[in-house]
Amino acid sequence: MHKRTQSGRWLLGAALFLFMAIANTGYAEQPGKVTFSEDVFPILKYRCLECHAAGGPGTVLSGLDLETYEGLMKGTKYGPIITPGNAMVSNLNVLVEGRAGIRMPHNRKRLTKCEVQILRDWVNQGAKNN
């Protein structure tokens, strides 16, 4: 009986370890639906509009006006900054994640990991105006 109890505990421990390992990888849960109006725009409003609103220094230099979804999707005078469905190559994500020579917001506090993840998920979900 003692041997059976030990093997049961070992099996339970192994199952618990496996569950925790999977949960910590991020694969245990899929990202929820991210919306522009409720999730993305509040980040842009709070973190980006100081420079990227009409007449702001970021808008004057780059042409990027983040006051509306249409402005975001239009991009800069050099081209689009969003590649719907692919955050890895979207310039918005590259800039806020610090994967370029410059980081946005420029000379300001970095976006939180949560804010970066919301933007990444939204772009990967198609960057819809929802």
Image (cartoon, rainbow, N blue to C red):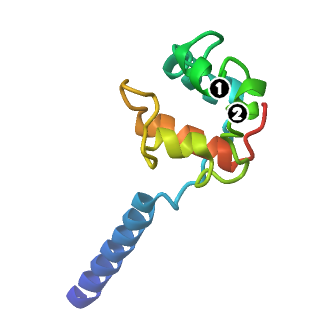
* Secondary structure of residue under mark 2: loop
Q: Which residue is mark 2?
A: 75
Asked whether 38 or 48 is in front, the reply is 48
Q: Earlier in the sequence, mark 1 or mark 2?
A: 1
Left or right, 31 with reference to 82: left
Query: Residue 34: x and y, percent?
Result: 66, 37
- Identify the residue at the far top of this view: 55
Q: Which residue is mark 1?
A: 64
29 up-or-down from 12: above or below = above
Q: Residue at x 67, y 32 (%)?
A: 76
Residue contact between numbered discs 1 and 2, judged by CB atoms under 8 Å: yes
Quadrant location of the C terminus in the rendered image: top right
Query: Residue 102: x and y, percent?
Result: 43, 39
Q: Residue at x 64, y 24 (%)?
A: 41
Q: Residue at x 67, y 50 (%)?
A: 124
Q: Residues within 10 Å of mark 2 (few under 14, many from 20)?
A: some
Where residue 128 sits, quadrant-wise, is top right
| Amino acid type of the residue that numbered disc 1 sits on in the rendered structure | Leu
Q: Residue at x 53, y 22 (%)?
A: 48
Left or right, 13 with reference to 64: left
